[in-house]
């Protein structure tokens, strides 16, 4: 997919977005949305569906929604609250590690730069990008498996990993183009451009997609 076709595809998807009933569009949360709760939600979301992450976050943040409160919880209490997410025992330890680090090294505040976020054990480039976008409104594009898969399916990228896609998009897209791209493509991947059996006959941009859409299986988040 050449640049002109990419621009057209994104414009079409932005117009279609309001019609989609996708988990990624959920805007009502049963907890305060702060940089801390967003950072912990990102940790919960790895290899877990959005609706499961949401429910687990609501249970956890009813108990503790600041790093100060979180470190008072035992690993077992956190595990019980988030048991439905994948790798919940490991994530419980990571949540405590993040909370302790924020208190000991960041004055209890979530950093607002990629460099500082990446110093935190358990936060990688993808998580950092989501935090910067959703917690601080910065113009970054978070590349998860949906974004990586879809842009390679279209032929706009030819990369092997989400990390490689992230580095390419840093230079390919302007700040304005990065804004909201993750949420747009994740929703698109949930309702139409699915990992297995994408709904090509219903896709509003099928005429712009240069690659043959072979059913593939990838982990979803």
Image (tube, grey):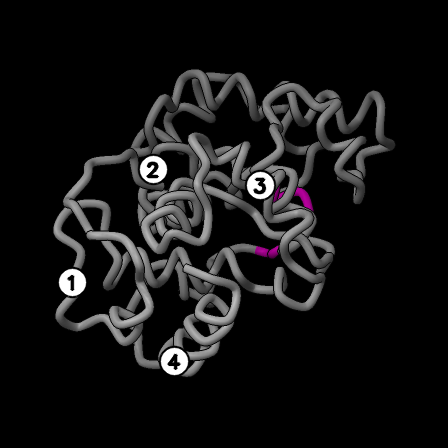
Q: Which residue is mark 2?
A: 48
For the residues labelled 4 and 1, the Cα–Cα distance comes to 18 Å
Q: Which mark is residue 20?
A: none
Reply above or below: 147 against 13.
above
Marks 3/2 in contact by CB < 8 Å: the verdict is no
Sequence-first disc among 3 and 2: 2
Sequence-first disc among 1 and 3: 3
Q: Which residue is mark 4?
A: 18
Single out the mark in the foreground, 3 or 4: 3
Question: Is 113 in front, or is 149?
Answer: 149
Reply above or below: 16 against 150.
below
Residue 160: image location, x then y, percent: 42, 31
Question: Is 145 in front, or is 33?
Answer: 145
Residue 1: image location, x then y, percent: 41, 59
Q: Residue at x 20, y 36 (%)?
A: 217
Q: Residue at x 43, y 49 (%)?
A: 147
Question: Is 140 in front, or is 132?
Answer: 140
Q: Quadrant of residue 176?
A: bottom right
Question: Is 6 in front, or is 25?
Answer: 6
Q: Which residue is mark 1?
A: 199
Callout 2: SS: loop
Left or right relative to 168: residue 49: left
Number of other residues with Cα within 10 Å of mark 4, as a class: few under 14, some 14 to 19, many 20 or more: few
Q: Residue at x 51, y 44 (%)?
A: 143
Magenta stretch: helix, strand or loop mostly = helix
Q: Which mark is residue 166?
A: 3
Single out the mark in the foreground, 3 or 2: 3
| Highlighted magenta segment, given as a residue range | 32-39
Marks 1/3 in contact by CB < 8 Å: the verdict is no
């Amino acid at each position: 997919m050449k640049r002109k076709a990419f621009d057209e595809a994104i414009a079409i998807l932005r117009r279609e977005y309001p019609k989609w009933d996708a988990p990624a569009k959920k805007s009502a949360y049963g907890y305060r949305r702060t940089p801390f709760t967003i950072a912990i939600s990102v940790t919960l979301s790895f290899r877990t569906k959005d609706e499961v992450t949401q429910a687990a976050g609501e249970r956890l943040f009813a108990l503790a929604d600041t790093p100060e409160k979180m470190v008072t919880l035992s690993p077992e209490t956190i595990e019980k609250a988030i048991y439905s997410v994948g790798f919940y025992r490991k994530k419980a330890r990571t949540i405590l590690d993040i909370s302790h680090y924020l208190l000991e090294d960041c004055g209890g505040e979530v950093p607002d730069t990629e460099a500082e976020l990446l110093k935190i054990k358990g936060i990688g480039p993808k998580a950092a990008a989501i935090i910067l976008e959703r917690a601080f409104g910065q113009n970054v594009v978070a590349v998860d498996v949906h974004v990586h898969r879809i842009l390679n399916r279209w032929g706009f990228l030819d990369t092997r990993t989400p990390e490689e896609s992230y580095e390419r998009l840093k230079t390919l897209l302007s700040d304005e183009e990065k804004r909201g791209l993750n949420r747009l493509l994740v929703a698109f991947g949930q309702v139409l451009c699915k990992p297995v059996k994408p709904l090509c006959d219903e896709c509003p941009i099928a005429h712009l997609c240069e690659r043959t859409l072979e059913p593939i299986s990838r982990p979803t988040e």
